[in-house]
Image (cartoon, rainbow, N blue to C red):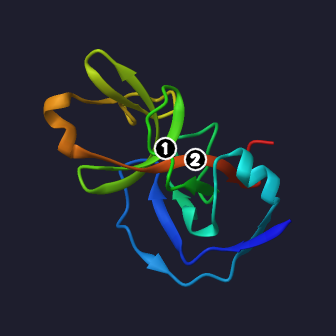
Amino acid sequence: TTVMDSCGDVEIGAGYGVALELVETKYRVPYQIEWLCSMGVRKPDDVRLMLVRGQSMEPIIFDSDKILIHLKDTRIISDAVFAIMLDGEPRIKRLFKSGEGIRIVSDNQDKVKYPDDLVTSEQADRLVIIGRAIHRQGSKGL
């Protein structure tokens, strides 16, 4: 096993987004090298822990969960969860490719409160892929 230090926790919105801010952290999280390699991680700087704020991804990802984001894995795979910047706000969302563009989906079934969004190819500048979520830490949902 190896211990990966997070250089800072990044809060990421599961709702309407939060201000992106790096803060010092005391967290040290052990991961097995073999597992990280199987997820495509080649070095510790390729991952970051992000603190989730909001309920838009419930019942899969909960407020205060920590999500391990693989920063080098930015190729969109339909139905995978990604850390993104949408209109300048960091968010954690499920992405889907379609003929119309990229559909950005919250797992929460309340679509009035958490509606899907569509980014067409003409609007591509609205969306930045930070990385793919590869692990969730949290005590809810068990």
For residue 68, which quarter of the picture?
bottom right
Residue 129 versus residue 104 in the image, above or below: below
Question: Is 39 left or right of 3, judged from the image as shown?
Answer: left
For residue 20, which quarter of the picture?
bottom left
Residue at x 54%, y 40% (from the top left corner): 57
Residue at x 78%, y 50% (from the top left corner): 35
- Considering every residue shown, the one lying at the far left of the view is 122
Would you name the residue on which mark 2 appears?
Answer: 133
Quadrant location of the N terminus?
A: bottom right
Q: Position of residue 92 (x, y in %)?
A: 47, 47
Sooner in the amino-acid sequence: mark 2 or mark 1: 1
Residue 16 versus residue 10 in the image, above or below: above
Q: Amino acid at mark 2?
A: Ala
Looking at the picture, tell me which residue is in the foreground, 78 or 118.
78
Question: Is 20 left or right of 127, judged from the image as shown?
Answer: right
- Considering every residue shown, the one lying at the far right of the view is 1
Quadrant location of the C terminus?
A: top right
Identify the disc placed on residue 105: none
Would you name the residue on which mark 1 appears?
Answer: 82
Whether residues under marks 2 and 1 lie with C-beta atoms below 8 angstroms apart, the answer is: yes
How crowded pointer 1 is (Cα within 10 Å; few <14, some 14-19, many 20+) is rated as: many
Looking at the picture, tell me which residue is in the foreground, 106 or 28.
28
- SS of the residue under disc 2: strand
Q: Amino acid at mark 1?
A: Phe
Looking at the picture, tell me which residue is in the foreground, 78 or 92.
78
Residue at x 64%, y 58% (from the top left corner): 42
Looking at the picture, tell me which residue is in the foreground, 113 or 122.
122
Residue at x 64%, y 54% (from the top left corner): 41
Residue at mark 2 to residue at mark 1: CA–CA distance:
5 Å
Q: Position of residue 111 (x, y in %)?
A: 41, 27
